Image (spheres, rainbow, N blue to C red):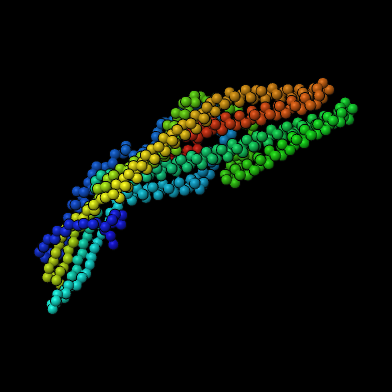
Amino acid sequence: MTPNALWPRPRAAVHTPVRLPRLGPTVLTALLSGLLSGLLSATLAGPAWAAGEHPAHTNPQARLQPEHQPWVAGLHQVLPPDAPVRAMLLQQPAVQAAHAGVGVAQGRQARLAAGPHEWTVRSGVQQRRESLGPRFTETEIALERGLRLPGKQRTDQAMGQAEVEVGTLAFEDTWHESARSLLKAWFDWLREWRSSRTLDEQRQLAEQQHQVVQRRIQAGEAARLEGLQAEAEASRAQAAWQQARARERSQQTELLRRYPALLASVQSLTAAPLPAPSPLPDSAADWVERVLADNHELELAEAQAQQAELQARRAALDKQADPSVGVRASRERGGAERVWGVYLSLPLGGAARRADEQTALALAQVARDKAAEVRQRVSNDAWRVALLASEGEAAWRSLDAAGQRMAQAAALATRAYSLGELPLGEALQSRRLALEAQLNADAVRLDVLESQSRLLLDAHQMWTPPSHDQEP
């Protein structure tokens, strides 16, 4: 059995045997315990790791002020309630795995705090035979342990804290990504539901138009060609609605299979109209600053970079190997001679330890570059969402106003045709333009609502992970 499974067997050892007088077992035990305790205390003593030198959660106090809450109420009309969302997020396999990872990190912290060295007991029995002489049974016992140098101990403590920090941030980031996925799936279904509802209204209008044409044909006021045109338009509207309904049902099935607790939210939302987006109380730059001030993905990348730097520091310290100190006792020549000794062994580091340091330094640089890339990507994504959320509301109002005017024009065109003042083709074309304008306005409305909801989510104003709720 090697003295330490994590390190190579010492190549050289300096033994200093000392002949002592006969000692009893009690005196011998006290002597060995006192000697090793003194050596370990002198070697392992060192200042505690400064609490400020490990990654910590930011606390930007970015909660929305009460005067900013009214615009959020409109979003809550379209979003599922907080309680079922949290319950479903906790049940997601990725979130559960990340939560288990926090326990793994805590175990690694305990392992780093304990250190790589353990007590090792050595014992042996041998026989000595002299030529033409007696035989002697000789025994030997030794107790030894590697001593972690003070700098390594402090670095291991910092690495343990970094492990827990990274594990916690990984859980929070996984929670946040799962919440983003739920939000996206929710609005994907909303888009299909809204499109299906709009096309259903258009189908009914096309059928009413077809009935008007049929009455005019029966009255001899319209040609059969117009009847064919109206019938074709009704069939086209019917097919478009059926396709939209199929997409909506598919999206709803996928949503509820993954998040079954949203069924009540789906049923309640389908009975109410979509709310109108409200202008944001702050500028896009303010929202970007709020998002970047407390972003799990960015914090995780920075914590991993600091963890890699600690590992590089530890690899540099490992170029100086840890010594091993031990005591030994032996009985030679059948007990006629008793030998007690203290020994020290020190591995001599070489090219392998220097290579480990270079590898750790390179990995630390990779982690720093990755953190910079994550910051750039998170910043770009935050600007994209913030600009759409803050400037999209004005665009929606313009499209909504245009859609209402187109709908009024289509209604007038339909009435004009029924009075024989407008050809059917122009009336149908007016109806198609009104439908296109309404679909565009609905799409922008949902894009703005989703972007504003995404801002709330990224700024940790809703659906926050449990650990985030526990912060002051």
* Left or right: 32 as drawn, with respect to 311: left
Q: Is residue 423 visible?
A: yes
* Left or right: 456 as drawn, with respect to 135: right
For residue 316, above or below residue 449: below
Quadrant of the rendered image containing residue 298: top left
Quadrant of the rendered image containing residue 397: top right
- x then y, percent, for residue 73: 55, 30
For residue 21, above or below residue 96: below
In this view of the protein, which residue sits in the foreground, 240 or 93?
240
x 13%, y 78%: residue: 132
In this view of the protein, which residue sits in the foreground, 33 or 39?
39
Taking the view exactly as shown, the residue that stands out farthest to the bottom is 132
x 24%, y 46%: residue: 150
* Left or right: 409 as drawn, with respect to 82: right
- x then y, percent, for residue 12: 21, 57
x 21%, y 62%: residue: 142
Placement of the N terminus among the 4 image quadrants: bottom left
Placement of the C terminus among the 4 image quadrants: top left
